[in-house]
Image: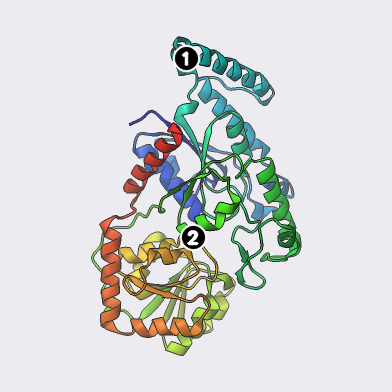
Amino acid sequence: MKNITIIILNDYCHINGGASKVAIDEAVGLANAGVKVIFIGACGPVCPELQNAKLEVICLEQTELINAGKNPFTMLQGLWNFKAAGIMRNVLESIVIPGASFPHKRSEWFGKLSDVVSSLCNRNKELDASLRWHDNRANTIIHLHGYTKALTTSPVRVANKLGFKVICTLHDFFPACPNGAFFDYVKCKPCPKRAMSLDCIKTQCDKRHYLHKLYRVVRTFIQQKFGELPSAVMDYITLSKQSADLLKSYLPEDARYYALENPIEIPHLPLVDVRANKSVVAVGRIDPEKGIETLLKAAEKAGVSLTLVGDGSLRGLAESYPFCRVTGWLSSAQVVSELAKARALIFPSLWYETYGLVVAEAAARGVPAIVSDISAAAERVEDRKTGWHMRAGDIDDMVRCFNIIGDDDSVAEAGLAAYNTFWKSPPILKNHVEKLLIIYDKVMVI
């Protein structure tokens, strides 16, 4: 195993959404593969997965933006996290000169030392060989995951200034869009405006109110201008072709992209007999942008039974329909159990999404999926083979798909095809880490 150090940056030191799960899974998987891992997170507590892994965790024990009402200072921290920048500087400077730990005021001196060493090494190859142990930047990568809830991009600026390679997984659209979704939550449809343009800034598209939108605009400006994301970050991991295409015009022209699916830890269980199941299952937030209202109307029209796994603002509406069962949030194992009871998965999202993890989880059990054509999840479904594409927000087209899965042979054939496709090359954590290490190797040699 190559002697490398990976520093993972994330808002949370516990699983709180998809980005955090991927960040933690990768940290643990890399550590198990013998890689030196340092996990830096803003918000605790530290989850057992990180506590029990052979890696270093630095938790800043800070509060997230959602708690700004209780602590107004959190709003300032959400714009620029000075503590995270300071911790990052100390960690990186000790990596360059092992055993050292420099306070902020000495960073200028450190920069001059680095310049001198680099200059000497460029002029004298023998000296370069003798001093190489002092500088481990070439074998260190900073991997950014979630940063909009507490961490900010302040650590990225430090890494860039000290000459470290940074790679960012594009879990959302926050590097460009103030609300992170390219979505107008007021009109409940994708937003065509250029992110951070005057037209964008003037538009109230936020879930809450316009003042919250303006705060996000200021935050985005600071992250882009002072945090140097995306301007100074050249390497990006993409979860879907669509999300990459939507972001490319906002990222550096010479940016490099690496496609990598999210890891999935799911047991290789026998194929589900979907013909024996009656309910269509949806997993995720029960909110308007997830297409829940369209789903409820289409299910009523088609006479389909629904199970909604999750929670959200439309839960009360969903529970008012007699054919709809709502479970609330469930553990990963319980979600797999619900999928085993499904005739099909429905993914009716009205916004682009970036991956659609549950579609892959359903395929792993042999449950075919009906997915909205606007979402990135459509890339994980071969239309009319492993599932079906439907027009986003179109009740009649969703009814068409519901009628198809009413046929036992059709739903069983699609389920078998989805199952075989998934297990042909499963994105389990071990395989994911192997691919991730190949990406890191490419980043280091550039």
Three-letter code, disc 2: Gln
Image spot of residue 277 (x, y percent): 31, 79
Instruction: From the viewer's perspective, tell me whether residue 304 is left or right of residue 137.
Output: left
Question: On screen, 310 above or below 63?
Answer: below
Secondary structure of the residue carrying tag 2 is helix
Q: Residue at x 36, y 62 (%)?
A: 361
Instruction: From the viewer's perspective, tell me whether residue 204 is left or right of residue 420.
Output: right
Spatial separation of the CA atoms under disc 1 and disc 2:
44 Å
Q: Residue furthest left?
A: 270
Q: Residues within 10 Å of mark 2 (few under 14, many from 20)?
A: some
Image spot of residue 49 (x, y percent): 42, 45
Front-lying residue, 313 or 380: 380
Q: Residue at x 55, y 55 (%)?
A: 172
User: Residue 334: in sight, yes or no?
Assistant: no
Instruction: From the viewer's perspective, tell me whether residue 405 is left or right of residue 147.
Output: left
Q: Which quadrant of the figure contains the N terminus?
A: top left
Disc ID at residue 128: 1
Instruction: From the viewer's perspective, tell me whether residue 300 is left or right of residue 270.
Output: right
Three-letter code, disc 1: Asp
Q: Residue at x 53, y 41 (%)?
A: 234
Disc ID at residue 242: 2
Front-lying residue, 335 or 23: 23
Image spot of residue 312 (x, y percent): 56, 69
Q: Residue at x 38, y 52 (%)?
A: 263
Image spot of residue 26 (x, y percent): 42, 45
Q: Residues within 10 Å of mark 1 (few under 14, many from 20)?
A: some
